[in-house]
Amino acid sequence: MNKHGELDGLNVTVVAEDSVLYESPFLGQHGISLFLETLSGSNTRNILVDVAQNPEALLQNMKLLGIHPQSIDTIVITHCHYDHTQGLVKILDGIGKNDVPVVVHPDLFRLNFVDDPYLRHVGVMAGDTRDKISAAGGRLFESRQSLQLLPGLFTSGEIERNTDFEEIGIALKTIVGGNIVEDTMPDDLALIARVRDKGIVILTGCSHSGVVNICRQSQKMTDQQPIKAVIGGFHLVEASPERISKTAKALGKLEIDSVAAGHCTGFRAQAELYKVFGERFTPLRTGMRIEF
């Protein structure tokens, strides 16, 4: 058996996304949040991956979906950006428990900014600092390496950047020792689930490290397990047609069973993914439930 173990079951519910299911009452927002129900033997654990940027909308969608915030056992934050982290403290307040694990990269709280069309910080906002997370009942687990949440479910750790066509997708900067430098998004991570008799399910936030890099690393970490599904944002919304094409073709060569991509993926990339994967591709929508 793989050192990471296996899950006996996994359900993924999209509780926040840029768009919503047809004729649904859900609230959309620029951001993403995924609710995972995991089964391992007789144990069940509920994991929230990212919190988008509008906690009131997120909590309303949870209510409509029958998800009780108090049922959340762990929160994983894929990277620093406000549309994945804003309102984290309010969500912890809603959970109302002490020592809730909040899994992050240790560089999550750094200054992360753009200067076009104007100067603004786009990372973790003032309402969600380390101290405020702790005061709201969160227990930060800050790791650069892969961290197991339970047997069969673990973070990717820092992603190796091996492809020659993938890029961060946005001109981000930070300040180190008083010097302005390019921010390479070292905190970008994914969540990997190894599901018994299925293969691996990969959950991404924005894939700033490259969704192909993420998939290849996930397979490397699981002894080349087949990829059952990739779910999340691929940040191809402003990518060139060449990069979009190369990404879709590279993913196609990985023989992934299904792809559900939205948020920062962009319409052109979704169309290209549909050309490659056909009915195995689904645009991500708030309210979707995917069972493994």
Image: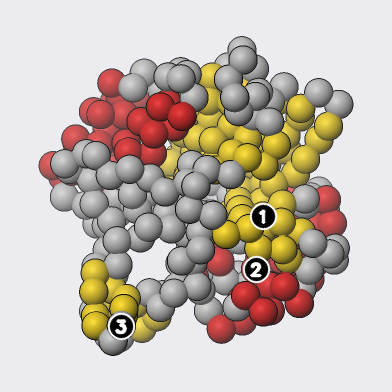
Q: Residue at x 49, y 24 (%)?
A: 222
Give 256 or 135, whichever is nearer the viewer: 135
Give 34 or 277, whichever is nearer the viewer: 34
Q: CA distance from mark 1 to mark 3?
A: 31 Å
Sequence order check, earlier mark of 1 and 2: 1
Task: Left or right? Give the position of 139 relative to 278.
Answer: right
Task: Left or right? Give the position of 194 relative to 100.
Answer: left
Q: Residue at x 67, y 51 (%)?
A: 48
Task: Give the numbered dot on residue 178.
Answer: none
Q: Is residue 31 visible?
A: no
Quarter of the image for residue 53 reads: bottom right
Tell whether label 3 touches label 2 (CB within 8 Å): no
Q: Dot 2 corresponds to which residue?
A: 88
Q: Residue at x 67, y 55 (%)?
A: 75
Q: Dot 3 corresponds to which residue?
A: 177
Task: Give the numbered dot on residue 75.
Answer: 1
- The location of residue 220, given as percent across then percent down, is 40, 27
